[in-house]
Amino acid sequence: MNDNTLDSFTERTLFGHPIGLFFLFLTEMWERFSYYGMRAILVLYIVEATSSDNPGLGWTNESAIALYGWYTMFVYVASIPGGIIADKLIGQRKSVFIGGILLVAGHSVLAIEVLWAFYTGLFLIILGVGMLKPNISTMVGGLYPKHEQNKRDMGFYIFYIGINLGAAAAAIIVGYVGQKIGWHYGFGLAGIGMALGQLTYWYGQKYLTHVGNLVVEDVSTDENQLVGDQNPGNKESNLLLSIFQSTNSIIGFSITFILGAMIWALWGSWDYGLLVMGLAFAVGVAIVVYNDGNKVEKDRILVTYLSFLIIIVFWGSFEQAGGLLNIYAQQKTDLNLGGFEIPASWFQSVNAIFILIFATLVGSFWVWWRNRGSESSSIFKMAIGVIIMGWGFFFMSIASSEVTYDTAGAVIGKSGMQWLVLAYLFHTIGELCASPVALSFITKLAPERWMAFMMGSYFAATGLGNKVAGLIGESAGDLGEFAIFTGIAVFCTIFGILVILITKPLKRLSHGAEDSEISK
């Protein structure tokens, strides 16, 4: 009777999709409400003068963007250990629950008006996102059979709408509270949102009992003996030690580690040197995972790793939104609309609102495009997304050319807000082409035993993109915004075209992973 009861819950559908999808949808909606609400005001709080009516930390633009870059990088890089913990210790479902608890704690601590609470809150949020983000996305993919590729893609689009419902509401509500009432009230409101998400996830457990559980493989079966020339059971207990058990992983680790040491020694940059040396372990583990596959799995893992480069380029450009573009909106954009001063943080909701408007249209376009027999692989969509997103920065080039300064360098003439809106429109269309497709792509190509790790690696690539965004944003003070915006647009266009040119060989390496949808 108990099993039948479980089946009655887990087999229920809503609008043709598993009902568990909508509990994950609501959980992620509130989690993104908390994250993007905090993100909308984070940099603005850091650069706000300590003497103002709503005092901030009084940092320079460059220092604020640098901290933002490090923070957002670690938020996503933490997805690697979060994925490994889920894959090898407790499963994805429990990892999401623990991540939610850490996030509630982190956002709540940020509401305390002392500096130690600021850093402690950011640290707890990093841990929480690392546990929750890769694993909840993997659970979405686990709700669908492997052969239902189109339905899975649409499921991720629905999931993506949940993300952006939370993001759109957060930037408006938390942004207004933070800027107009008090920064720490805004941080506290983000914590309340995460608490609601945690309660939603707890209530929906009965619909999710069949996904996100710890996978224990029987290595004695013939099937599992085919996973590669190394026995998974011998290395899963300590992935880091496994780096030093094969020649190619040792070489990959050593080259990356030496590069980090050179950055430290020759350029005197200990922070970036340590970052690259830390990435040496990620490179080593990635090769260990590659070695674990059979021929088909190795090819698919290789394509997945190459797609991470696209992700780094995409988010390295796109994530100017929370840093450089956020400060640009506050300091160099005319925010007056009919006598009302629009809070700069509200522009952080424009992308999310556009996603809610265009998500279904973009998803439907790609279905139509595929039915015409045109190229519609995930790699192709991601490349198109990079190009379109990059074109959005041409509007920011126009905006930066409108700003005028006095002889002392102070802003005396600001640019129109329409350029920001148009930039975010193109960023949104590009994101809808690339991001949800990339999430689904990984669940198609990654071996089941490494699913959460690969999803964690995707978010780690996103994190590295965020750090690249911070580095680019920091250089705006020296190079100027026009050069930065135009350079991003041109680079993304060239990069996207190059990826399109190698789409066919990458499709061959995927061994039909995207061609298994049953014709209907």
Image: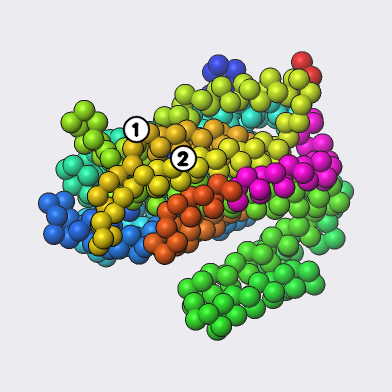
Locate residue 476 relative to residue 115 in the image: left or right. right
Residue visible at 76% across and 57% down in the picture: 290
Task: From the image, give the main secondary structure of the stretch colored magenta.
Answer: helix
Locate residue 258 relative to residue 96 in the image: left or right. right
438, above or below 219, in the image: above
Q: Residues within 10 Å of mark 1 (few under 14, many from 20)?
A: many
Answer yes or no: is residue 442 visible: no
Residue 412 lies, in percent from the top left, at 24, 50
Locate residue 511 relative to residue 234 in the image: left or right. right
Q: Secondary structure at mark 2?
A: helix
- The reply to whether the magenta stretch includes residue 514 is yes
| Contact flag, marks 1 and 2 (Cβ < 8 Å) | no
Q: Name the residue nearer the viewer: 166 or 435.
A: 435
Question: Which quadrant of the figure has residue 198?
Answer: top left
| Way the structure is coloured | rainbow
Residue visible at 39% across and 62% down in the picture: 477
Which amino acid does the dot numbered 1 rest on?
Ala
**Disc nearer the start of the sequence (1/2):** 1
Q: Quadrant of the C terminus?
A: top right
* Residue at the extreme bottom of the image, as rendered: 265
Alpha-carbon span between mark 1 and mark 2: 25 Å
Query: Disc 2 designates what residue?
Result: 395
Which amino acid does the dot numbered 2 rest on?
Phe
Query: Disc 1 designates what residue?
Result: 169
Residue 78 lies, in percent from the top left, at 51, 57
Report the span colored magenta: 491-516
